[in-house]
Image (cartoon, grey):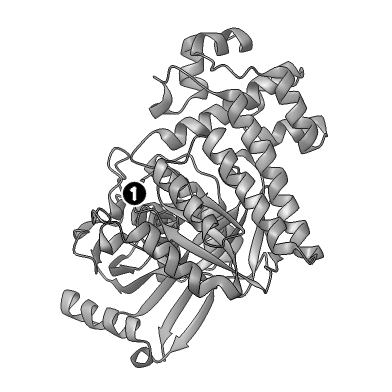
Amino acid sequence: MATESPATRRVQVAEHPRLLKLKEMFNSKFGSIPKFYVRAPGRVNIIGEHIDYCGYSVLPMAVEQDVLIAVEPVKTYTLQLANTNPLYPDFSTSANNIQIDKTKPLWHNYFLCGVKGIQEHFGLSNLTGMNCLVDGNIPPSSGLSSSSALVCCAGLVTLTVLGRNLSKVELAEICAKSERYIGTEGGGMDQSISFLAEEGTAKLIEFSPLRATDVKLPSGAVFVIANSCVEMNKAATSHFNIRVMECRLAAKLLAKYKSLQWDKVLRLEEVQAKLGISLEEMLLVTEDALHPEPYNPEEICRCLGISLEELRTQILSPNTQEVLIFKLYQRAKHVYSEAARVLQFKKICEEAPEDMVQLLGELMNQSHMSCRDMYECSCPELDQLVDICRKFGAQGSRLTGAGWGGCTVSIVPADKLPSFLANVHKAYYQRSDGSLAPEKQSLFATKPGGGALVFLEA
Protein backbone atom coordinates (compact mmCIF):
# COMPACT_ATOMS: atom_id res chain seq x y z
CA MET A 1 0.00 0.00 0.00
CA ALA A 2 2.78 2.43 0.87
CA THR A 3 4.06 2.63 -2.71
CA GLU A 4 0.74 2.42 -4.52
CA SER A 5 -0.45 5.50 -6.44
CA PRO A 6 -4.11 6.61 -6.58
CA ALA A 7 -6.12 4.52 -9.03
CA THR A 8 -7.08 5.70 -12.52
CA ARG A 9 -10.40 4.45 -13.87
CA ARG A 10 -11.85 4.64 -17.34
CA VAL A 11 -15.55 5.47 -17.26
CA GLN A 12 -18.42 6.12 -19.65
CA VAL A 13 -19.23 9.67 -18.52
CA ALA A 14 -22.75 9.38 -19.97
CA GLU A 15 -23.48 6.64 -17.40
CA HIS A 16 -22.56 8.86 -14.43
CA PRO A 17 -25.12 11.69 -14.03
CA ARG A 18 -22.85 13.86 -11.88
CA LEU A 19 -19.85 13.54 -14.23
CA LEU A 20 -22.06 14.19 -17.23
CA LYS A 21 -23.54 17.33 -15.66
CA LEU A 22 -20.02 18.51 -14.75
CA LYS A 23 -18.83 17.88 -18.33
CA GLU A 24 -21.73 19.91 -19.75
CA MET A 25 -21.17 22.79 -17.31
CA PHE A 26 -17.45 22.73 -18.11
CA ASN A 27 -18.21 22.96 -21.81
CA SER A 28 -20.55 25.92 -21.37
CA LYS A 29 -18.00 27.64 -19.07
CA PHE A 30 -14.76 27.08 -21.00
CA GLY A 31 -16.00 26.14 -24.49
CA SER A 32 -14.15 22.81 -24.44
CA ILE A 33 -14.39 19.40 -22.79
CA PRO A 34 -12.42 18.13 -19.77
CA LYS A 35 -9.44 15.86 -20.33
CA PHE A 36 -9.98 14.04 -17.01
CA TYR A 37 -11.77 14.21 -13.65
CA VAL A 38 -10.42 13.83 -10.11
CA ARG A 39 -12.36 12.83 -7.00
CA ALA A 40 -11.35 13.12 -3.32
CA PRO A 41 -13.72 12.14 -0.50
CA GLY A 42 -14.57 13.89 2.74
CA ARG A 43 -14.27 11.93 5.95
CA VAL A 44 -15.89 11.35 9.30
CA ASN A 45 -13.61 10.82 12.25
CA ILE A 46 -15.21 8.07 14.33
CA ILE A 47 -12.90 8.62 17.31
CA GLY A 48 -9.61 10.41 18.00
CA GLU A 49 -10.37 14.14 17.99
CA HIS A 50 -7.65 16.82 18.05
CA ILE A 51 -4.85 14.30 18.56
CA ASP A 52 -3.37 13.83 15.08
CA TYR A 53 -1.36 17.06 15.40
CA CYS A 54 -0.11 15.78 18.77
CA GLY A 55 1.35 12.70 17.02
CA TYR A 56 -1.36 10.19 17.94
CA SER A 57 -3.35 7.68 15.88
CA VAL A 58 -6.89 8.46 14.75
CA LEU A 59 -9.75 6.33 13.43
CA PRO A 60 -11.62 7.92 10.49
CA MET A 61 -13.43 6.58 7.45
CA ALA A 62 -14.06 8.24 4.09
CA VAL A 63 -17.67 9.25 3.39
CA GLU A 64 -19.46 9.02 0.06
CA GLN A 65 -19.66 12.83 -0.24
CA ASP A 66 -16.69 14.24 -2.13
CA VAL A 67 -15.05 16.97 -4.19
CA LEU A 68 -15.01 16.35 -7.93
CA ILE A 69 -12.95 18.42 -10.36
CA ALA A 70 -13.12 18.47 -14.18
CA VAL A 71 -9.76 19.43 -15.68
CA GLU A 72 -8.32 20.54 -18.99
CA PRO A 73 -4.58 21.36 -19.23
CA VAL A 74 -4.02 24.44 -21.42
CA LYS A 75 -1.02 25.88 -23.26
CA THR A 76 -1.10 29.19 -21.37
CA TYR A 77 0.40 29.64 -17.90
CA THR A 78 -2.98 30.62 -16.46
CA LEU A 79 -4.88 28.69 -13.85
CA GLN A 80 -8.64 29.27 -14.24
CA LEU A 81 -10.93 28.02 -11.48
CA ALA A 82 -14.70 27.91 -11.45
CA ASN A 83 -17.18 26.28 -9.08
CA THR A 84 -20.59 24.75 -9.79
CA ASN A 85 -21.84 26.50 -6.64
CA PRO A 86 -22.60 30.16 -7.47
CA LEU A 87 -21.65 31.17 -3.91
CA TYR A 88 -18.00 30.58 -4.85
CA PRO A 89 -16.78 33.13 -7.42
CA ASP A 90 -14.48 32.36 -10.36
CA PHE A 91 -10.78 32.90 -9.88
CA SER A 92 -7.76 33.01 -12.16
CA THR A 93 -4.04 33.48 -11.52
CA SER A 94 -0.66 32.80 -13.08
CA ALA A 95 0.28 29.15 -12.47
CA ASN A 96 3.87 30.28 -11.85
CA ASN A 97 3.17 32.86 -9.20
CA ILE A 98 0.84 31.29 -6.67
CA GLN A 99 0.08 33.60 -3.75
CA ILE A 100 -2.04 32.33 -0.85
CA ASP A 101 -3.59 34.97 1.36
CA LYS A 102 -3.71 33.59 4.92
CA THR A 103 -5.95 36.41 6.07
CA LYS A 104 -8.83 35.26 3.84
CA PRO A 105 -9.84 31.57 3.84
CA LEU A 106 -11.45 31.88 0.39
CA TRP A 107 -12.40 28.67 -1.41
CA HIS A 108 -9.81 29.00 -4.19
CA ASN A 109 -6.96 29.29 -1.66
CA TYR A 110 -7.49 25.64 -0.66
CA PHE A 111 -7.12 24.65 -4.32
CA LEU A 112 -3.94 26.72 -4.55
CA CYS A 113 -2.51 24.94 -1.47
CA GLY A 114 -2.68 21.60 -3.31
CA VAL A 115 -1.14 23.02 -6.50
CA LYS A 116 1.67 24.76 -4.60
CA GLY A 117 2.43 21.63 -2.55
CA ILE A 118 3.04 19.52 -5.67
CA GLN A 119 4.88 22.36 -7.44
CA GLU A 120 7.29 22.77 -4.51
CA HIS A 121 7.74 19.01 -4.02
CA PHE A 122 9.12 18.70 -7.56
CA GLY A 123 10.89 22.09 -7.43
CA LEU A 124 9.06 23.34 -10.53
CA SER A 125 8.95 26.96 -11.57
CA ASN A 126 7.13 26.51 -14.89
CA LEU A 127 3.72 24.97 -14.42
CA THR A 128 1.33 24.43 -17.27
CA GLY A 129 -1.98 26.27 -17.07
CA MET A 130 -5.30 24.52 -16.56
CA ASN A 131 -9.02 25.12 -16.60
CA CYS A 132 -10.79 23.52 -13.64
CA LEU A 133 -14.43 23.25 -12.65
CA VAL A 134 -14.99 22.19 -9.03
CA ASP A 135 -18.10 20.44 -7.73
CA GLY A 136 -18.49 19.43 -4.09
CA ASN A 137 -21.32 17.82 -2.14
CA ILE A 138 -19.65 17.77 1.31
CA PRO A 139 -21.51 20.25 3.56
CA PRO A 140 -19.04 23.18 4.00
CA SER A 141 -17.65 24.04 7.47
CA SER A 142 -19.37 20.94 8.87
CA GLY A 143 -16.36 19.04 10.22
CA LEU A 144 -16.44 16.51 7.35
CA SER A 145 -13.26 17.88 5.84
CA SER A 146 -14.52 19.62 2.71
CA SER A 147 -11.48 21.93 2.68
CA SER A 148 -8.92 19.11 2.94
CA ALA A 149 -10.76 17.15 0.24
CA LEU A 150 -10.35 20.20 -2.03
CA VAL A 151 -6.62 20.45 -1.19
CA CYS A 152 -6.16 16.70 -1.91
CA CYS A 153 -8.16 16.91 -5.12
CA ALA A 154 -6.07 19.88 -6.32
CA GLY A 155 -2.83 18.04 -5.46
CA LEU A 156 -3.91 15.01 -7.49
CA VAL A 157 -5.11 17.25 -10.36
CA THR A 158 -1.67 18.94 -10.52
CA LEU A 159 0.19 15.63 -10.33
CA THR A 160 -1.94 14.21 -13.18
CA VAL A 161 -1.46 17.31 -15.37
CA LEU A 162 2.31 17.03 -14.84
CA GLY A 163 2.24 13.32 -15.76
CA ARG A 164 4.19 12.49 -12.59
CA ASN A 165 3.76 9.66 -10.09
CA LEU A 166 3.64 9.68 -6.30
CA SER A 167 2.38 7.10 -3.82
CA LYS A 168 -0.81 7.72 -1.84
CA VAL A 169 1.29 8.16 1.31
CA GLU A 170 3.57 10.76 -0.34
CA LEU A 171 0.54 12.62 -1.68
CA ALA A 172 -1.13 12.62 1.74
CA GLU A 173 2.02 13.97 3.40
CA ILE A 174 2.48 16.72 0.76
CA CYS A 175 -1.17 17.79 0.99
CA ALA A 176 -1.13 17.80 4.82
CA LYS A 177 1.93 20.04 4.77
CA SER A 178 0.61 22.32 2.03
CA GLU A 179 -2.75 22.94 3.73
CA ARG A 180 -0.77 24.86 6.36
CA TYR A 181 -0.23 27.59 3.73
CA ILE A 182 -3.76 28.66 4.67
CA GLY A 183 -2.60 29.21 8.26
CA THR A 184 -4.10 26.14 9.97
CA GLU A 185 -1.61 24.13 12.03
CA GLY A 186 -3.44 20.83 11.47
CA GLY A 187 -2.30 17.23 11.66
CA GLY A 188 -2.47 14.80 8.75
CA MET A 189 -5.65 12.82 9.36
CA ASP A 190 -7.92 14.40 6.74
CA GLN A 191 -5.46 14.15 3.86
CA SER A 192 -4.38 10.61 4.84
CA ILE A 193 -7.88 9.14 4.84
CA SER A 194 -8.77 11.00 1.62
CA PHE A 195 -5.99 9.11 -0.19
CA LEU A 196 -5.71 5.87 1.81
CA ALA A 197 -9.42 5.06 2.30
CA GLU A 198 -10.83 1.80 0.98
CA GLU A 199 -14.48 0.86 0.60
CA GLY A 200 -15.94 -1.18 3.42
CA THR A 201 -13.36 -0.44 6.11
CA ALA A 202 -12.45 2.32 8.52
CA LYS A 203 -8.72 2.96 9.03
CA LEU A 204 -6.43 3.38 12.00
CA ILE A 205 -4.10 6.11 10.74
CA GLU A 206 -0.72 6.31 12.44
CA PHE A 207 1.91 9.00 11.93
CA SER A 208 5.72 9.17 11.72
CA PRO A 209 5.83 7.15 9.53
CA LEU A 210 2.37 7.51 8.02
CA ARG A 211 0.53 4.20 7.71
CA ALA A 212 -3.05 2.95 7.65
CA THR A 213 -4.49 -0.30 9.05
CA ASP A 214 -7.96 -1.66 8.28
CA VAL A 215 -10.48 -1.58 11.14
CA LYS A 216 -13.58 -3.71 10.55
CA LEU A 217 -16.61 -1.91 11.98
CA PRO A 218 -19.44 -3.92 13.60
CA SER A 219 -21.89 -5.36 11.09
CA GLY A 220 -24.90 -4.89 13.39
CA ALA A 221 -24.54 -1.12 13.62
CA VAL A 222 -24.63 1.94 11.37
CA PHE A 223 -22.79 5.24 11.71
CA VAL A 224 -25.05 8.24 11.30
CA ILE A 225 -23.86 11.79 10.65
CA ALA A 226 -25.99 14.76 11.70
CA ASN A 227 -25.15 18.38 10.91
CA SER A 228 -25.72 20.82 13.80
CA CYS A 229 -26.07 23.58 11.15
CA VAL A 230 -23.55 25.71 13.06
CA GLU A 231 -20.71 26.52 10.66
CA MET A 232 -17.14 26.70 11.85
CA ASN A 233 -14.32 27.56 9.48
CA LYS A 234 -11.16 26.65 11.38
CA ALA A 235 -8.95 28.87 9.22
CA ALA A 236 -11.13 31.90 9.93
CA THR A 237 -10.72 31.83 13.72
CA SER A 238 -7.86 31.20 16.11
CA HIS A 239 -9.70 28.55 18.25
CA PHE A 240 -8.03 25.71 16.41
CA ASN A 241 -4.49 27.11 16.45
CA ILE A 242 -4.80 28.07 20.13
CA ARG A 243 -5.47 24.39 20.93
CA VAL A 244 -2.45 23.33 18.85
CA MET A 245 -0.27 25.80 20.75
CA GLU A 246 -1.69 24.75 24.14
CA CYS A 247 -0.74 21.15 23.33
CA ARG A 248 2.71 22.28 22.18
CA LEU A 249 3.27 24.26 25.39
CA ALA A 250 1.96 21.38 27.54
CA ALA A 251 4.44 19.05 25.80
CA LYS A 252 7.31 21.45 26.53
CA LEU A 253 6.36 21.87 30.20
CA LEU A 254 5.95 18.11 30.69
CA ALA A 255 9.32 17.51 29.00
CA LYS A 256 10.99 20.14 31.21
CA TYR A 257 9.38 18.59 34.34
CA LYS A 258 10.86 15.23 33.36
CA SER A 259 14.30 16.75 32.59
CA LEU A 260 14.03 16.05 28.85
CA GLN A 261 15.40 18.37 26.17
CA TRP A 262 12.17 20.40 26.09
CA ASP A 263 13.17 22.91 23.40
CA LYS A 264 13.25 20.12 20.77
CA VAL A 265 9.81 18.77 21.76
CA LEU A 266 6.74 19.87 19.73
CA ARG A 267 4.13 17.16 20.34
CA LEU A 268 2.66 15.42 23.35
CA GLU A 269 3.37 12.01 21.81
CA GLU A 270 7.12 12.79 21.79
CA VAL A 271 7.12 13.16 25.57
CA GLN A 272 5.52 9.73 25.99
CA ALA A 273 7.91 8.17 23.47
CA LYS A 274 10.98 9.67 25.17
CA LEU A 275 9.82 8.51 28.60
CA GLY A 276 8.85 5.07 27.27
CA ILE A 277 5.71 4.85 29.41
CA SER A 278 2.01 4.10 28.79
CA LEU A 279 -0.75 6.61 28.05
CA GLU A 280 -2.25 5.88 31.47
CA GLU A 281 1.11 6.74 33.08
CA MET A 282 1.27 9.95 31.01
CA LEU A 283 -2.05 10.98 32.58
CA LEU A 284 -0.44 10.58 36.03
CA VAL A 285 2.61 12.62 34.94
CA THR A 286 0.20 15.34 33.70
CA GLU A 287 -1.52 15.38 37.15
CA ASP A 288 1.88 15.86 38.83
CA ALA A 289 3.44 18.34 36.42
CA LEU A 290 0.61 20.70 35.40
CA HIS A 291 -2.02 22.58 37.41
CA PRO A 292 -5.69 22.87 36.37
CA GLU A 293 -5.68 26.69 36.65
CA PRO A 294 -4.92 28.42 33.35
CA TYR A 295 -1.34 29.53 32.69
CA ASN A 296 -0.49 33.04 31.55
CA PRO A 297 2.44 33.74 29.19
CA GLU A 298 4.62 35.03 32.05
CA GLU A 299 4.23 31.80 34.05
CA ILE A 300 5.04 29.69 30.99
CA CYS A 301 8.18 31.78 30.44
CA ARG A 302 9.21 31.29 34.09
CA CYS A 303 8.67 27.51 33.85
CA LEU A 304 10.76 27.27 30.68
CA GLY A 305 13.31 29.96 31.58
CA ILE A 306 12.72 32.00 28.41
CA SER A 307 11.67 35.58 27.61
CA LEU A 308 8.21 36.64 26.37
CA GLU A 309 9.84 37.56 23.07
CA GLU A 310 11.23 34.02 22.71
CA LEU A 311 7.83 32.51 23.56
CA ARG A 312 6.10 34.62 20.91
CA THR A 313 8.62 34.32 18.11
CA GLN A 314 10.01 30.80 18.63
CA ILE A 315 7.04 28.80 19.93
CA LEU A 316 3.67 30.45 19.21
CA SER A 317 2.05 30.70 15.77
CA PRO A 318 1.42 34.22 14.34
CA ASN A 319 -2.30 34.24 15.26
CA THR A 320 -1.75 33.07 18.88
CA GLN A 321 0.92 35.54 19.98
CA GLU A 322 -1.54 37.79 21.81
CA VAL A 323 -3.33 34.99 23.70
CA LEU A 324 -3.40 35.69 27.45
CA ILE A 325 -4.43 32.32 28.94
CA PHE A 326 -3.47 28.75 28.09
CA LYS A 327 -5.20 25.69 29.56
CA LEU A 328 -2.36 23.17 29.44
CA TYR A 329 -3.56 20.61 32.01
CA GLN A 330 -7.00 20.17 30.39
CA ARG A 331 -5.64 19.87 26.86
CA ALA A 332 -2.98 17.29 27.78
CA LYS A 333 -5.53 15.25 29.76
CA HIS A 334 -7.84 15.18 26.74
CA VAL A 335 -5.09 14.16 24.31
CA TYR A 336 -3.68 11.30 26.39
CA SER A 337 -7.12 9.92 27.31
CA GLU A 338 -8.43 10.25 23.75
CA ALA A 339 -5.34 8.51 22.33
CA ALA A 340 -6.05 5.60 24.72
CA ARG A 341 -9.72 5.49 23.61
CA VAL A 342 -8.67 5.13 19.95
CA LEU A 343 -6.56 2.06 20.77
CA GLN A 344 -9.38 0.58 22.88
CA PHE A 345 -11.85 1.16 20.03
CA LYS A 346 -9.62 -0.71 17.58
CA LYS A 347 -9.10 -3.57 20.06
CA ILE A 348 -12.86 -3.98 20.59
CA CYS A 349 -13.41 -4.03 16.80
CA GLU A 350 -10.78 -6.80 16.48
CA GLU A 351 -12.06 -8.91 19.37
CA ALA A 352 -15.76 -8.38 18.45
CA PRO A 353 -17.36 -9.24 21.82
CA GLU A 354 -21.15 -9.68 21.97
CA ASP A 355 -21.68 -6.25 23.54
CA MET A 356 -19.34 -4.63 20.99
CA VAL A 357 -21.75 -1.89 19.86
CA GLN A 358 -22.44 -0.84 23.45
CA LEU A 359 -18.71 -0.78 24.32
CA LEU A 360 -17.83 1.29 21.23
CA GLY A 361 -20.71 3.64 22.02
CA GLU A 362 -19.40 4.18 25.56
CA LEU A 363 -15.98 5.18 24.16
CA MET A 364 -17.64 7.65 21.77
CA ASN A 365 -19.65 9.15 24.67
CA GLN A 366 -16.47 9.52 26.76
CA SER A 367 -14.79 11.17 23.79
CA HIS A 368 -17.58 13.75 23.49
CA MET A 369 -17.44 14.55 27.22
CA SER A 370 -13.69 15.08 26.99
CA CYS A 371 -14.04 17.27 23.86
CA ARG A 372 -16.74 19.29 25.62
CA ASP A 373 -15.20 19.66 29.09
CA MET A 374 -11.42 19.29 28.71
CA TYR A 375 -10.84 20.52 25.16
CA GLU A 376 -13.77 22.95 25.05
CA CYS A 377 -14.39 22.45 21.34
CA SER A 378 -18.10 21.72 21.46
CA CYS A 379 -21.00 24.21 21.38
CA PRO A 380 -24.56 24.20 22.81
CA GLU A 381 -26.10 22.98 19.52
CA LEU A 382 -23.66 20.04 19.26
CA ASP A 383 -24.33 19.06 22.89
CA GLN A 384 -28.08 19.23 22.26
CA LEU A 385 -27.79 17.14 19.08
CA VAL A 386 -25.65 14.51 20.86
CA ASP A 387 -28.29 14.26 23.65
CA ILE A 388 -31.10 13.89 21.07
CA CYS A 389 -29.20 11.16 19.22
CA ARG A 390 -28.61 9.19 22.44
CA LYS A 391 -32.24 9.64 23.51
CA PHE A 392 -33.51 8.09 20.26
CA GLY A 393 -31.34 4.99 20.18
CA ALA A 394 -27.69 5.85 19.52
CA GLN A 395 -25.40 3.72 21.69
CA GLY A 396 -22.83 6.51 21.44
CA SER A 397 -22.71 9.98 19.92
CA ARG A 398 -20.02 12.63 19.72
CA LEU A 399 -18.91 15.73 17.83
CA THR A 400 -16.67 14.96 14.87
CA GLY A 401 -14.11 17.17 13.15
CA ALA A 402 -12.65 20.29 14.72
CA GLY A 403 -15.87 21.07 16.61
CA TRP A 404 -17.30 24.48 17.60
CA GLY A 405 -20.07 23.52 15.17
CA GLY A 406 -20.32 21.05 12.32
CA CYS A 407 -21.45 17.45 12.69
CA THR A 408 -22.00 14.67 15.19
CA VAL A 409 -21.37 10.99 14.50
CA SER A 410 -23.48 8.33 16.24
CA ILE A 411 -23.32 4.55 16.40
CA VAL A 412 -26.86 3.18 15.97
CA PRO A 413 -27.99 -0.47 16.04
CA ALA A 414 -29.06 -1.28 12.46
CA ASP A 415 -32.60 -2.35 13.47
CA LYS A 416 -33.24 1.05 15.11
CA LEU A 417 -32.09 3.11 12.11
CA PRO A 418 -35.47 4.06 10.54
CA SER A 419 -37.02 5.23 13.83
CA PHE A 420 -33.75 6.94 14.85
CA LEU A 421 -33.60 9.00 11.63
CA ALA A 422 -37.28 9.99 11.86
CA ASN A 423 -37.10 10.97 15.55
CA VAL A 424 -33.83 12.92 15.33
CA HIS A 425 -35.09 14.77 12.27
CA LYS A 426 -38.26 15.76 14.08
CA ALA A 427 -36.55 16.69 17.37
CA TYR A 428 -33.64 18.70 15.96
CA TYR A 429 -34.47 19.90 12.43
CA GLN A 430 -38.21 20.54 12.60
CA ARG A 431 -38.01 23.46 15.01
CA SER A 432 -41.19 25.45 15.40
CA ASP A 433 -39.32 28.72 14.83
CA GLY A 434 -37.89 27.47 11.50
CA SER A 435 -34.43 28.69 12.56
CA LEU A 436 -32.39 26.03 10.74
CA ALA A 437 -31.66 26.73 7.08
CA PRO A 438 -33.02 23.77 5.04
CA GLU A 439 -29.91 23.60 2.82
CA LYS A 440 -27.69 22.96 5.85
CA GLN A 441 -29.90 20.23 7.31
CA SER A 442 -28.21 16.95 6.84
CA LEU A 443 -28.81 13.62 8.57
CA PHE A 444 -27.62 10.42 6.92
CA ALA A 445 -26.31 6.93 7.56
CA THR A 446 -22.92 6.33 6.00
CA LYS A 447 -20.61 3.44 5.27
CA PRO A 448 -16.86 3.53 4.63
CA GLY A 449 -16.16 4.84 1.12
CA GLY A 450 -13.11 4.63 -1.13
CA GLY A 451 -10.22 7.09 -1.55
CA ALA A 452 -9.11 9.61 -4.17
CA LEU A 453 -9.37 8.60 -7.85
CA VAL A 454 -8.66 9.88 -11.35
CA PHE A 455 -11.38 9.28 -13.99
CA LEU A 456 -10.60 9.19 -17.70
CA GLU A 457 -13.34 9.10 -20.30
CA ALA A 458 -13.52 5.66 -21.95
**Amino acid bearing label 1:** Glu
Say whether residue 252 is visible. yes
Say whether residue 210 is visible. no
**Residue at (53%, 72%) from the top-left corner?**
417
Left/right of residue 442 with respect to residue 244 in the rendered view: left
**Residue at (52%, 34%) from the top-left corner?**
244
**Residue at (62%, 51%) from the top-left corner?**
364
Give whichever of 350, 236 is nearer the camera.
350
Give whichever of 219, 277 is nearer the camera.
219
Q: Position of residue 185 (x, y in %)?
A: 48, 39
> In what element is the residue under mark 1?
loop
Per the image, the residue denoted by label 1 is 231
User: Quick one: quadrant of the C terminus?
Assistant: bottom left
Give whichever of 7, 398 is nearer the camera.
398
Total labels: the figure holds: 1
Give whichever of 384, 216 is nearer the camera.
384
User: Quick one: quadrant of the N terminus?
Assistant: bottom right
Q: Residues within 10 Å of mark 1 (few under 14, many from 20)?
A: some
Vertical arrangement, residue 390 with respect to residue 165, above or below: above
Q: Position of residue 304 (x, y in %)?
A: 62, 12
Left/right of residue 210 with respect to residue 64 in the rendered view: right
Q: Position of residue 248 (x, y in %)?
A: 58, 29
**Residue at (70%, 47%) from the top-left corner?**
341
Based on the displayed image, in which of its 4 quarters is residue 287 positioned?
Answer: top right
Vertical arrangement, residue 103 with respect to residue 89, above or below: above
Left/right of residue 200 with respect to residue 62 in the rendered view: right
Vertical arrangement, residue 447 with respect to residue 261, above or below: below
Q: Position of residue 420 (x, y in %)?
A: 50, 67
